[in-house]
Amino acid sequence: MRRRHVLGAGLAIAVAGMAGSAMAQSEIKIGEINSYSLLPAFTEPYRKGWQLAVEEVNAAGGINGKKLVVISKDDGGKPADAQTAANELVSSENVAMLTGTFLSNIGLAVSDFANQKKVFFLAAEPLTDAITWSKGNRYTFRLRPSNYMQAAMLVEEAAKLPAKRWATIAPNYEYGQSAVAVFKKLMSEKRPDIQWVDEQWPPQGKIDAGPVVQAVAAANPEAILNVTFGADLVKLVREGNTRGLFKGRSVVSFLTGEPEYLDPLKEETPEGWIVTGYPWYDIKTPDHDKFLKAYQAKYSDYPRLGSIVGYQTIKAAAAILAKANSTDPEKLIAATEGLSMPSPFGEITFRKIDHQSTLGAYVGKTALKDGKGVMVNSVYRKGADYLPGDAEVAKLRPKD
């Protein structure tokens, strides 16, 4: 009797182990990292976007019949913490890939981790050109249109301005430095007659707007490039309005048309800035209508640009996993290079040459309507139209 009892107990343990193994095999886990506590204006809508996408993927049968599970971690805006989170997701959670990140320096840190550990990484938001070019690697892909792409879109409009004297204001870290460098390069190529008369580099999240505005005004530019966002943008606009910095001057601004940055300006919204952004209220396409309806039904709220990025990041991850039909990093890379898929902005493709997606952006002007900032005269610019060709990219990106 004792022997039979031991055998029975052993069989029960074995069956439980098999069930646990089967359970593990019936789902695919993705690791997601972002600066939730540092940048909630963007990351909260972003989280809502990816949660909606997970629901839709699983409702449609998951990944080749397996449930998609996202395990999310907060990096607190610190590159070292992001790498620690990445390591935990890979070593402890056995995720099939890493996704996410917001700040460019954090995106680069996770990209470096992915390259060293040979883990697939789909960067959602970081905009620095280095992620796909100078520090690009075979394990990293990027969804958002890069600084180069958005600068090229803005330069197309900025070059038409009569202004010859330009000043720049940008946060002093990887994103701001990259954005200013590429805007100046592309703008000077189109308009060799312009002069760069001043540069201001406030620390990210800690702008002292008074001295910044005073210094720019003293340089007497005819136009200003702004790269600040979030709380820094609010402070800059308030101080600039008070001191008349923007009066009679053209302003070109990265990201300012995104609702997460435009909405907080309220009645202080400066009019006529040339911006990239997301005028969700003016987009009339079947792809966007479908997304908007689903998002509003789930959250009783309107989407921000972060919502689009979070949603499409997981939709892209699901498409990659489904095509690869494997969690092997090399098969995921092979599946992603050249892969096309739908998005709320229309079809996008991940380029083989540099792993950059062709997701585009809306370009328009700021205006004040009913006490709120809006984007007007906006036009969608396809990402593929604002990327350099293979020969140029080959010079910018190291060989794998």
Image (tube, rainbow, N blue to C red):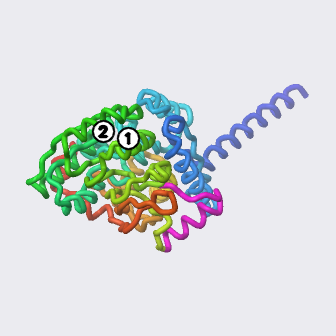
Q: Residue at x 38, y 63 (%)?
A: 348
> Could you tell me how far apart the alpha carbons at marks 2 and 1 are, in whole angstroms?
7 Å
Q: Residue at (34%, 46%) from the top-left corner?
A: 127
Which range is magenta? 286-305
Q: Secondary structure at mark 2?
A: helix
- Relative to 131, residue 59 above or below: below
Which disc is residue 213 wearing? 2
Q: Most prominent secondary structure in the magenta stretch?
A: helix
Given residues 249 and 187, the one toward you in this image is: 249
Based on the displayed image, in which of its 4 quarters is residue 16 positioned? top right
Label 1 is placed on what type of residue? Glu
Residue 335 appears in view: no
State the quadrant of the C terminus.
top left
The x, y position of residue 188, in whole percent, is 13, 52
Residue 158's x, y, as percent?
A: 23, 58
Left or right position of 156 against 121: left
Labels 2 and 1 touching (C-beta < 8 A): yes
Q: Which residue is painted at 40% across and 31% down in the image? A: 206
Q: Amino acid at mark 2?
A: Val
In the image: residue 14, left or right of residue 320: right
SS under mark 1? helix
Q: Quadrant of the N terminus?
A: top right
Closer to the camera in the image, 282 or 348: 282
Q: Position of residue 364 (x, y in %)?
A: 35, 63
